[in-house]
Amino acid sequence: MKTIGSHLAALTAGGTKLRRQLGPFIRYVAFLTAIVLVYGWLFHVIMAWEGQEHTWFTGIYWALTVMTTLGFGDITFHTDLGRVFSTVVLLTGVILLLVILPFLFIRLVYAPWLEQRSRARVLALRAVPKDVSEHVLICADDPMAKGLIQRLALSGIRAYLVEADPDRAMFLQDEGVPVVTGDVDSVETYRAAGADRARLVLANASDTVNSNIVLTVRELSATVPVAAVAEVEDSIDVLELSGATHVLPLKQRLGEHLANRVSAGSCHANVIGEFHDLQLVEFPVHNTPLQNRTVRDIGLREYTGVTMVGVWDHGRFHPASPDRELSPMSVPVAIGTPAQIEDLNEILVIYDANPNPVLIIGGGKVGRSAARALKKRGIPVHIVERKQELEARITGIPDRLFIGDAADRHVLDEAGIAGAPSILLTTHDDAMNVYLSVYCRRLNPEARILTRVTHERNIEAIQRAGSDFVLSYAAFGVQTVMSIVRQRELVVLGEGVNLFYVPVPRSLANKTLIEAEVAARTGLNVIAVQQNGHVRTALDREDRLPAGSELVALGTNEQRQRFREVFG
């Protein structure tokens, strides 16, 4: 009843235009009522002629049952005249009640009501509540937008997506995405969205639109932080001159991070992130005494002080439990001070020397960026590119360039796939990357295969195909923006794995790690405890979690949400 009442209120409050649209429908209903009354009167006349006696209301009852094709049969005519009249009433009812009435109702009542409600919803989406501040505005619905909103929500930060299309805005709102409607190049849009009190404005459209967004936001506020995504390297200077606080060439940095996970040359630990005075590193165990041994047997902390916090195995991240055995293709993740990492490198450097070039398949922006990063480290690189028109852009970056189809066995053989220590698949076609993962794994079972992915839905398929490490544009973009929002160092662990700073809740204050059972109950892997700027990584099961401290934990968004549900 409340719903019906609210609908009627919305209908009556629709204004003069809506009431004017209802006029023809009301006149039609009046005409229909008159027809029923006339038929009821004629029914009474013909029945009297046949010698049957019925009340006036019975005539209306009969007319309605015949016009609506119910025809109960409890009242019938006995003459041909009566039957002809019944046929006329039946056909009239089919036309007036079953055809015209529904059409007019939808056209003149239901459709205007829906339009009025949609207009009201759009108006409600035009502004961020004035009591909301320190929020994030996202200016385009790109692959990383929804993931970023989800990640910000886990950190207790509100985010709103700016959408110009009202229909699209309502669709996104129905999916649970907070939306503000308005043009991305309008100062009024950002004024209504509270950009002047926002924590960050993310310009993540095309380079030309992003430049316009930055200039527009700067008309409203000269101090609000603005991060702009740069598609091409030449746009970086333009966006900075426009007033962007942070310029993010995500594709270029994606290639650099993929290059940073490459295993090539002598065995060593690759630094994948830093926070405070600690480094987070990965290192291979292939052809070293560490392979086929458990984490407990290796005793890495005793020898170097480095703490193993996780293990990549066949593209999936696992906690470094004491009983986990490292396969030849495992890549452990560890944390320690720079001096401790150097001690680790002294152990690894004598193993697994492979001087062969790294093979990159795909010479686009990501592939070229990865090749430049590898060359800076002194690692030889070969690139395979199918498009002849890209030859001029790629020439001079790798040691050798091979123009041809990577699906051609002869091209890959000539490029040196058989001896490549690592293979980077950087094409923008996910289906091709799945195919190449299977193909390259067959041609070189011992190489480490690293793959970029555009759509997160293809991650599972690429991992099953044989990739050892997968990183999507969306996940990388989310982690990059989160590092800006939280004002912390960028740590890119890999697809689906994030580094969380979690305040110790009251339910865990002063409990030991074994009492808390964080990993068992949520899946989050606590790797450090931070208090008063000091980070302690060499945690023991009996270590207590001080009130007011922060847990530094590895895990997925789902595990972080489970932590909130379990511990508050």
Image: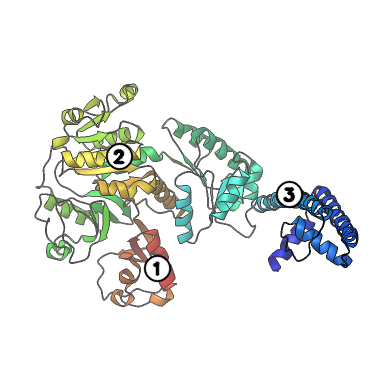
Whole-percent x, y for residue 560 in the image: 39, 63
Q: Earlier in the sequence, mark 3 or mark 2?
A: 3
Pointer 1 and pointer 3: residues touching (CB < 8 Å)?
Answer: no
Which picture quadrant has residue 337? bottom left
Camera sees residue 349: yes
Relative to 511, say whether 123 is above or below.
above
Q: Could you say whether the residue bearing mark 3 is in a helix, strand or loop? A: helix
| 135 vs 453, nearest the viewer | 453
| 452 vs 87, nearest the viewer | 87
Which residue is found at the position 10% from the left and 52% from the top?
288
Query: Distance of mark 3 from mark 2, alpha carbons?
Result: 49 Å
Q: Could you say whether the residue bearing mark 1 is in a helix, strand or loop? A: helix
Which residue is found at the position 35% from the left and 68% from the top?
522
Q: Is residue 420 left or right of residue 566?
A: left
The amino acid on which the numbered mark 1 sits, given as a three-letter code, is Phe
The residue that label 3 is drawn on is 112
Whole-percent x, y for residue 318 in the image: 26, 59
The amino acid on which the numbered mark 3 sits, given as a three-letter code, is Pro
Relative to 540, say whether 133 is above or below.
above
| 67 vs 107, nearest the viewer | 67
Q: Earlier in the sequence, mark 1 or mark 3?
A: 3
Which picture quadrant has residue 536? bottom left
Q: Earlier in the sequence, mark 1 or mark 2?
A: 2
The residue that label 1 is drawn on is 563
Whole-percent x, y for residue 263 in the image: 19, 44
Instruction: Sort mark 3 into few (<14), some (14-19) or many (20+) by Cα contacts within 10 Å.
Output: some
Q: Could you say whether the residue bearing mark 2 is in a helix, strand or loop? A: helix
Pointer 1 and pointer 2: residues touching (CB < 8 Å)?
Answer: no
| 230 vs 30, nearest the viewer | 30
Pointer 3 and pointer 2: residues touching (CB < 8 Å)?
Answer: no
The residue that label 2 is drawn on is 433
